[in-house]
Amino acid sequence: MSVPGELSYAKTHEWMRREDDVATIGITEHAQDELGDVVFVELPEKGATYGAGDAFGAIESVKAVSDLYAPVGGEVVEVNEALNDAPEKVNEDPYGEGWIVRLRVSNEGDLFSADEYEKFLEEEAG
Protein backbone atom coordinates (compact mmCIF):
# COMPACT_ATOMS: atom_id res chain seq x y z
CA MET A 1 0.00 0.00 0.00
CA SER A 2 1.51 3.31 -1.01
CA VAL A 3 1.62 6.35 1.26
CA PRO A 4 2.75 9.33 -0.85
CA GLY A 5 5.52 11.20 0.92
CA GLU A 6 4.46 14.71 -0.09
CA LEU A 7 1.07 14.54 1.66
CA SER A 8 -0.05 15.01 5.27
CA TYR A 9 -2.40 12.55 6.96
CA ALA A 10 -5.08 12.57 9.67
CA LYS A 11 -5.78 9.83 12.23
CA THR A 12 -9.21 9.53 10.58
CA HIS A 13 -7.50 8.47 7.31
CA GLU A 14 -7.88 11.63 5.26
CA TRP A 15 -4.93 12.99 3.32
CA MET A 16 -4.12 16.63 2.58
CA ARG A 17 -2.04 18.30 -0.11
CA ARG A 18 -1.29 21.93 0.74
CA GLU A 19 -0.73 24.53 -1.99
CA ASP A 20 -0.31 28.00 -0.48
CA ASP A 21 -3.48 28.54 1.58
CA VAL A 22 -5.61 25.88 -0.15
CA ALA A 23 -5.69 22.25 0.98
CA THR A 24 -6.91 19.45 -1.29
CA ILE A 25 -8.38 16.65 0.81
CA GLY A 26 -9.35 13.05 0.11
CA ILE A 27 -9.32 9.68 1.82
CA THR A 28 -6.25 7.45 1.93
CA GLU A 29 -5.70 4.27 -0.01
CA HIS A 30 -6.00 2.42 3.31
CA ALA A 31 -9.41 4.02 4.00
CA GLN A 32 -10.84 3.25 0.56
CA ASP A 33 -9.53 -0.31 0.85
CA GLU A 34 -11.25 -0.76 4.22
CA LEU A 35 -14.51 0.72 2.90
CA GLY A 36 -14.70 -1.37 -0.23
CA ASP A 37 -16.56 -0.17 -3.32
CA VAL A 38 -17.61 3.47 -2.82
CA VAL A 39 -21.14 4.08 -4.11
CA PHE A 40 -21.86 7.65 -2.92
CA VAL A 41 -19.96 10.68 -1.59
CA GLU A 42 -21.88 13.36 0.30
CA LEU A 43 -20.08 16.59 -0.59
CA PRO A 44 -20.22 19.78 1.49
CA GLU A 45 -21.61 23.07 0.19
CA LYS A 46 -19.18 25.54 -1.35
CA GLY A 47 -18.66 28.38 1.11
CA ALA A 48 -19.29 26.24 4.21
CA THR A 49 -16.67 26.50 6.94
CA TYR A 50 -15.32 23.75 9.18
CA GLY A 51 -12.89 23.50 12.05
CA ALA A 52 -10.07 20.96 12.12
CA GLY A 53 -11.63 17.61 12.99
CA ASP A 54 -15.18 18.59 12.02
CA ALA A 55 -17.24 16.20 9.87
CA PHE A 56 -17.76 17.83 6.46
CA GLY A 57 -19.52 15.04 4.58
CA ALA A 58 -19.91 11.30 4.35
CA ILE A 59 -18.80 8.45 2.15
CA GLU A 60 -20.97 5.42 1.51
CA SER A 61 -19.68 2.07 0.38
CA VAL A 62 -21.20 -1.35 -0.07
CA LYS A 63 -20.02 -2.08 3.52
CA ALA A 64 -20.73 1.09 5.52
CA VAL A 65 -21.32 4.83 5.72
CA SER A 66 -18.45 6.82 7.24
CA ASP A 67 -18.10 10.49 8.09
CA LEU A 68 -15.41 12.54 6.38
CA TYR A 69 -13.38 14.80 8.70
CA ALA A 70 -11.53 18.01 7.87
CA PRO A 71 -7.83 17.55 8.70
CA VAL A 72 -7.56 21.37 8.86
CA GLY A 73 -10.08 24.12 9.39
CA GLY A 74 -11.23 26.34 6.59
CA GLU A 75 -13.77 27.36 3.99
CA VAL A 76 -14.86 25.06 1.17
CA VAL A 77 -13.66 26.64 -2.09
CA GLU A 78 -14.25 23.65 -4.38
CA VAL A 79 -15.82 20.20 -4.30
CA ASN A 80 -15.11 17.33 -6.68
CA GLU A 81 -18.42 17.34 -8.58
CA ALA A 82 -17.18 14.41 -10.70
CA LEU A 83 -17.79 12.16 -7.66
CA ASN A 84 -21.55 12.72 -8.00
CA ASP A 85 -21.54 10.65 -11.19
CA ALA A 86 -18.44 8.53 -10.55
CA PRO A 87 -17.91 7.89 -6.80
CA GLU A 88 -15.69 4.93 -7.75
CA LYS A 89 -12.91 7.45 -8.53
CA VAL A 90 -12.24 7.39 -4.76
CA ASN A 91 -11.35 3.68 -5.07
CA GLU A 92 -9.56 3.92 -8.40
CA ASP A 93 -7.38 6.99 -7.72
CA PRO A 94 -7.68 8.09 -4.06
CA TYR A 95 -4.70 10.49 -4.25
CA GLY A 96 -5.59 11.93 -7.68
CA GLU A 97 -8.99 12.11 -9.39
CA GLY A 98 -10.64 10.80 -6.21
CA TRP A 99 -9.97 13.98 -4.19
CA ILE A 100 -13.08 15.19 -2.35
CA VAL A 101 -12.82 18.84 -1.31
CA ARG A 102 -10.57 21.90 -1.34
CA LEU A 103 -10.50 24.18 1.69
CA ARG A 104 -8.99 27.63 2.13
CA VAL A 105 -7.08 26.90 5.34
CA SER A 106 -7.86 29.05 8.38
CA ASN A 107 -6.38 26.85 11.10
CA GLU A 108 -4.05 23.89 11.24
CA GLY A 109 -4.92 20.41 12.38
CA ASP A 110 -2.87 17.68 14.03
CA LEU A 111 -1.42 15.82 11.03
CA PHE A 112 1.03 13.02 10.39
CA SER A 113 3.88 12.94 7.90
CA ALA A 114 3.88 9.94 5.53
CA ASP A 115 6.34 8.06 7.79
CA GLU A 116 4.28 8.79 10.90
CA TYR A 117 1.09 7.68 9.12
CA GLU A 118 2.71 4.38 8.06
CA LYS A 119 3.70 3.77 11.71
CA PHE A 120 0.15 4.64 12.81
CA LEU A 121 -1.27 2.09 10.34
CA GLU A 122 1.11 -0.57 11.65
CA GLU A 123 0.06 0.18 15.25
CA GLU A 124 -3.64 0.08 14.28
CA ALA A 125 -3.16 -3.30 12.59
CA GLY A 126 -1.68 -4.61 15.83
Image (cartoon, rainbow, N blue to C red):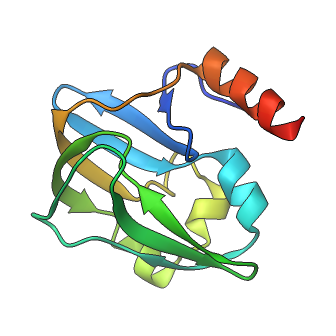
> What residue is at 20 percent from the left and 37 percent from the top?
22
Quarter residue 62 falls in: bottom right
Quarter residue 104 falls in: top left
Q: Name the side, left or right, on which 81 lies relative to 27.
A: left
Can you see residue 17? yes
The answer to whether residue 69 is above or below residue 73 is below
Q: Name the side, left or right, on which 16 lies relative to 27.
A: left
> What residue is at 20 percent from the left and 73 percent from the top?
45
Can you see residue 1? no
> What residue is at 67 percent from the left and 53 percent from the top?
31
Which quadrant does the C terminus fall into?
top right
- Name the residue furthest right: 126
The answer to whether residue 111 is above or below residue 98 is above
The answer to whether residue 70 is above or below residue 124 is below
Please provide percent x and percent y for residue 40: 53, 81
Q: Name the side, left or right, on which 73 lies relative to 115.
A: left
The answer to whether residue 22 is above or below residue 62 is above
Number of numbered tags placed on the structure image:
0
- Name the residue furthest left: 47
Front residue of this view, candidates 10 and 78: 10
> What residue is at 58 percent from the left and 62 percent from the top?
90
Please provide percent x and percent y for residue 39: 61, 82
Please provide percent x and percent y for residue 76: 18, 57
Quarter residue 72 falls in: top left
Which quadrant does the N terminus fall into?
top right
Please provide percent x and percent y for residue 15: 49, 40
